[in-house]
Amino acid sequence: MQTTDPNIHIRSSQDRFEAPDFYQIDDLLTEEHKLIRDAVRTFVKKEISPIIEDYAQRAEFPQDIVKKFGEIGAFGPTIPSEYGGGGLDYISYGLIMQEIERGDSGMRSTVSVQSSLVMYPIYAFGTEEQKQKYLPKLASGEMLGCFGLTEADYGSNPSGMQSHFTDEGNHYLLNGSKMWISNAPYADIAVVWAKNENGRVRGLIVERGMEGFSTPEIHNKWSLRASTTGELVFDNVKVPKENLLPGIEGLRGPMQCLDSARYGIAWGALGAAMDCYDSAKRYALERIQFDKPIASFQLTQKKLAEMLTEITKAQLLCWRLGMLKNEDKATTAQISLAKRNNVEMALNIAREARQIHGGMGITGEYPIMRHMMNLESVVTYEGTHDIHLLILGNEITGIPAFK
């Protein structure tokens, strides 16, 4: 494979990934589902696997991947085709997220943000003019978007946000800032949530080039190093009134977006876990110690058996949740359960896989340490591990513990 950057080293090791399917879950998928999954799997092996370790080591974002994601239909797969989307169901969306995060969590974050946090709110809450203006370009990868909700002092408590805007007659005047925003440094547009004069949260589409709008990059990350993360800073930004999302008011809007993103994360974390398991199994069969492969030792077999068990449980969880999403029955609490469970599962598998790889597990010759570091971000963003426990606790008891 060739790359536009001559300084990027292409790994010689081939991506030999084979997905586990112990409970024959493929039998639950349609032929279209399997064709979509296999096409994305091939894309990941060709376009992501050969370069991702080097980009992660260099903490650089492979910018040309955005157009490539657009070409394969990874952006907005559930958005209707009339707006450039794929018109696919949620099982298909989940499988796309699974395969891309199998390649790298940062790459899946790029796609998740574009699809669930930028295209979805424009489609769900925007005007027809906004949909026609932005969605086709976002779907093709001509435009990259980001989602502005989290602030430096308001992460798990977005209702405390300080970003605000005022009505100045022929435009809105936006002030404030957002933190930990995926895609921000390269985004062409930002879907920003801020409070109006009445303290109500509303959504605005802010475009790059608007005076007073800047997106400084966040450096020195140990996680999601191949992803691009930044701030959104608004200093008296004049936002045209036609850029207000009219279809939603209050935190219900961004929370609906986060439900969609969390659903994709549940599938994506499964992909990372599958990659760690596949690498560990292959390494255990090839690594010889005491004159036999380490796969022959009971403790290694215990690790692999537990990995496969947890992956199989997560596959069934994702499939059922996808069916509920297709029927428009999936609740916030159900999605929280899947996000929390699958990310924790993937982190545990990454750590066990690192043990099986021994010292080689910390090198870029294997994906384990990169997945492990990435998942340390995934377990926190789109709702922390603890917040999702409390969402479930509220669902169980009817008593909110975080108010």
Image (cartoon, helix red, strand yellow):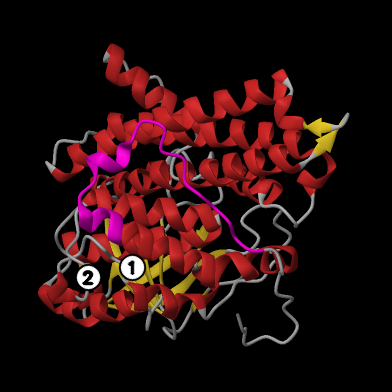
Residue at numbered disc 1 = 75
Residue ID at (70%, 74%): 10
Q: Is residue 28 magenta?
A: yes
| Nearer-the-camera pick, 98 or 258 | 98
Q: Quadrant of residue 16?
A: bottom right
Q: Position of residue 250 (x, y in %)?
A: 24, 48
> Mark 1 or mark 2, which is nearer the start of the sequence?
1
| Nearer-the-camera pick, 299 or 320 | 299
Quadrant where the C terminus lies?
Answer: top left
Assess whether mark 1 and mark 2 are in contact (beta carbons under 8 angstroms). Answer: yes
**Dot 1 crowding, Cα within 10 Å, few <14, some 14–19, many 20+:** many
Q: Residue furthest top?
A: 397
Q: Residue furthest right?
A: 290
Residue 22 in view (yes/no): yes
Q: Which residues are magenta?
A: 14-35
Residue at numbered disc 2 = 85
Residue ID at (63%, 38%): 281
Residue ID at (56%, 23%): 306
